[in-house]
Image (cartoon, helix red, strand yellow):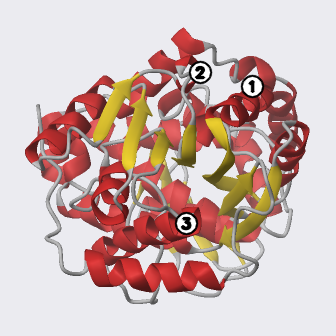
Amino acid sequence: MYNLLDRALKTVMARGTLRVTGPDGVVRDYGDGTGQPVNLHIRTPLAAAKVAADSDLYIGECYMDGTLDVSGGSTIYDVMALILENAQGHRIPKVVKAAYAVRKALKRVDQYNPVGKAKSNVAHHYDLSGALYDLFLDRDRQYSCAYFETDDGSLEDAQLAKKRHLAAKLDIKPGMKVLDIGSGWGGLGLYISEICGAEVTGVTLSEEQHKVSNERARQRGVSERVQFLLKDYRHLNQKFDRIVSVGMFEHVGVGHFKEFFTKVNGLLKDDGVAVLHSINRSDGPGATSAWIKKYIFPGGYIPALSEVLPHIEKAGLYVTDVEILRLHYAKTLREWGLRFADHRERAKELYDERFCRMWEFYLASSECAFRYAGMNNFRIQFAKNQHVLPLTRNYIIEEEERLRVIDSKLPRLKSVSVD
């Protein structure tokens, strides 16, 4: 059964050295022999067959159950980085291509996310213990791509810069009504209210995030200006001056893109502005990873710009700015992975060893996807009226600097826990 995996690895590996100990105990090298060997151990014939037949699902699954493991100082990140870096040359086995084609054909079925199902999908991931997220996120529990203004900036600084950059791009004026779709633990909404002077409504489908974000607003004394609702955005009916959505669109599903932008159009005032921040599939429409769909984000899908922009146009909205963040999420995930590793024993106390291996694989494979598999982030700014924003992008830089003066003087409060 190892022969299938042997042929697959010979197809994929062109550079570097992947050293595999098979279930028969034989050590085999793949690649051109350069670099420090990355050591992988396949413990059972069944695991070898599974990985050969559908690596997208079974590398992660076999790592979780220990039938695929790493050794000799190597990590699962090292394995995924080496494989994906080689796969950039499109040296992909036919069986892997076939499995991906099937997933691509079925993606509208997999991503059917009506209101009730959307809530249960969100609960699968975001209603895990808040103590888990405190192990690897920044103090504000920002669970989306940070914005690194310098290559050596801290995660805390980069997440603050992300909020500042988004707020500047929205061109918020005091007293404006702002909607945050997918408001998480409330950090962005609180920033927009406290720093920009806006009235903020956030919506989330996570009961855990809803509790935490409202408690944060209460403790900071801004509940009269910031409210977080446990509600699907599709159930809102008021109008807003500004709408922002960060890291939520990946949960919408390709079959609901028209619904999303039609609803946002209805929620936006005639002189309103919106910014959508999402992971982007830079090589065009595809399919969600089988492992990610099963274990991490059921119903989720990373869109391509070519799938999103037509729906904005058809909804009668003007695209006013598009920004691509290339390696910022790779750097974010690296920070999360290091922090999780530092607190792994605590994570094991909260859950178990299998969960820890699942989370390690999630963070490592995601980082590799941004470094080697063409994933990045887009920020699309759009409006109903193309005359509502300044003529050049200079206002964004000027507003960022104005907000920096304000936010640099305020304490960075830690997200509360209501476990």
**SS assignment at label 1:** helix
- Tag 3 residue: 171
| Amino acid bearing label 2 | Arg
Specify the label residue 192 is tagged with.
none
Residue at 79%, 23% in the rendered image: 108
Q: Is residue 392 above or below residue 58?
A: below
Residue 306, image x and y in percent? 88, 51
Gap between marks 3 and 2 measured at Cα: 25 Å
Specify the label residue 234 is tagged with.
2
Q: Nearer the viewer, mark 1 or mark 3?
A: 3
**SS assignment at label 2:** helix
Gap between marks 1 and 2 measured at Cα: 9 Å
301 on left or right of 10: left
Q: Nearer the viewer, mark 3 or mark 2?
A: 3
131 on left or right of 46: left
Q: Are marks 1 and 2 in contact (CB under 8 Å)?
A: yes
- Tag 1 residue: 259
